[in-house]
Amino acid sequence: MPVHGVCPERLDAFRDRESARFARVRPKTRRLLDQGAQAWLGGVPMHWMRDWPSPFPLVVKRAEKARLTDADGFEIDDFCLGDTGSMFGHAPAPVARAIRRQARRGLTYMLPSKAALRAGRLLCERFGPLVWQIATTATDANRNALRVARAVTGRRKVLVFNGCYHGTLQDTMVALEGGRTVARPGLVGQVFDISAEAVCVEFNDLDAVEAALASGEVAAVLTEPVMTNSCMVLPAPGFHRGLRSLTQRYGTLLIIDETHTQSSGLGGYSRVHGLVPDLFVVGKCVAGGVATAVWGMTEAVAEAFTAYDAARPSGHSGMGTTLSGNPLQFAALEATLAEVMTPEAYAAMEAGAGRLARGLSGVIAHHALPWHVARVGARVEFICAPGPLRNGSDAAAAHAPQLEAALHLGLLNRGCLIAPFHNMMLVSPVTKQRQIDRLIAGFDEILSELTT
């Protein structure tokens, strides 16, 4: 019986063929990973790098614009783009120049540079008139924003949405099961009950949000404007307006994490759609791929936190790390904001992503599959289920791990890399039309093998 519109026997045979094909032509990559296993867990510097759907991960020799070259010399069109970290293409020229200049002046010194002060003004121009701080990752930025929210409200809990993604922020590693907030399964070394400080409800469910906020215990709602790290879930009409109204009614701060939804357009989803959060987080691509995140506060939140900070006992705040705020970050951040993250870049991304979404939708319709395509600006995703999805539970049910793994591997063997773990594709300003068309053609070829 077909599963997600595909015959299981065809899927098994396809996956076996594609796995053998991938492994056969990459002897250098396999050898390098075997050598790496002498020093690295599983042969890779981060254990999850082994979780790509290929028999073993690629070893990258070079990345330029929207293309990778692997250790065996294969050139691959990159639609993963470091899963948003290189959303504007690999090593944009202005960022590379800024890094080279700063490298001659020093890499870290725990004090601001001129570029840092200029970057603050550019952040306000791009994302809005907020009071900013810097971090190394969006996880760190979310952690700091949540600490501030708890400090100024005097409340303990955070509300997040089922299936959310906010990096590895421990406070948000919860799920909704049977109407109860529980720790997510699979957490490593978890030693205390996260659900004591978190409330989890479904995205797009304003009644559930209000019921949670009415307790008066929730310091902040932390949300992406669009759920992005599983099967993509778009906000229902009026959801964000209702969410802002409820948080204001119950004295809860609203933190919007735009680490992924910078794809939406210049200034992110919030600026494009007129959202007004109390705290705002962006990371990954904001400095062109150099490890950087920033978080901003409204003037009102900044004033409340300044008063709190002045009155608290002396000692470590639990916020900030030694290498955060280094001048290399600010050199890359300034270059990205001023010369890479431009209206022209977003116009090119929007056009390319529209072409990709239309092409994938056409292929799905041609093969009469009950799937759909979701898009947020430059971010495109094919979902192996009907849509639109309403919430995290819908997204979990739509996930088809075996089928998706086969599709990813088939595309990689046809020269196209998409994001692992879900079916996300990014179109950068330097992605060529022929690369988009090659991905669409590869998708069509794979579906022909799986459905004919």
Image: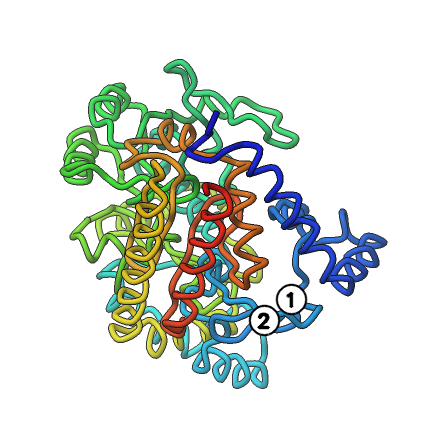
Q: Is residue 351 above or below residue 39?
A: below
Please give the residue where the numbered disc 2 appears in the rendered image.
Answer: 75
Q: Secondary structure at mark 1?
A: strand
Q: Nearer the viewer, residue 326 or 400?
A: 400
Q: Position of residue 323 (x, y in %)?
A: 57, 62
- The number of callouts visible is 2
Residue 164 — which label?
Answer: none
Q: Nearer the viewer, mark 2 or mark 1?
A: 2
Q: Residues within 10 Å of mark 1 (few under 14, many from 20)?
A: some
Q: Position of residue 352 (x, y in %)?
A: 31, 66
Left or right of 109: which side holds 430?
A: left
Q: Nearer the viewer, residue 140 or 338?
A: 338
The image quarter containing residue 287 is bottom left
The type of residue carrying mark 2 is Glu
Q: Secondary structure at mark 2?
A: strand
Left or right of 49: which side holds 417?
A: left
Q: Nearer the viewer, residue 88 or 105?
A: 88
Compare marks 2 and 1 and give the one earlier in the sequence: 1
Q: CA distance from mark 2 to mark 1?
A: 10 Å
Please give the residue where the numbered disc 1 appears in the rendered image.
Answer: 60
The type of residue carrying mark 1 is Val
Residue drawn at 65 percent across, 30 percent down: 189
Q: Position of residue 142 (x, y in %)?
A: 42, 46
Q: Residues within 10 Å of mark 2 (few under 14, many from 20)?
A: some
Residue drawn at 61 percent across, 71 percent down: 69
Q: Position of residue 188 (x, y in %)?
A: 64, 32
Residue drawn at 40 percent across, 64 percent down: 286
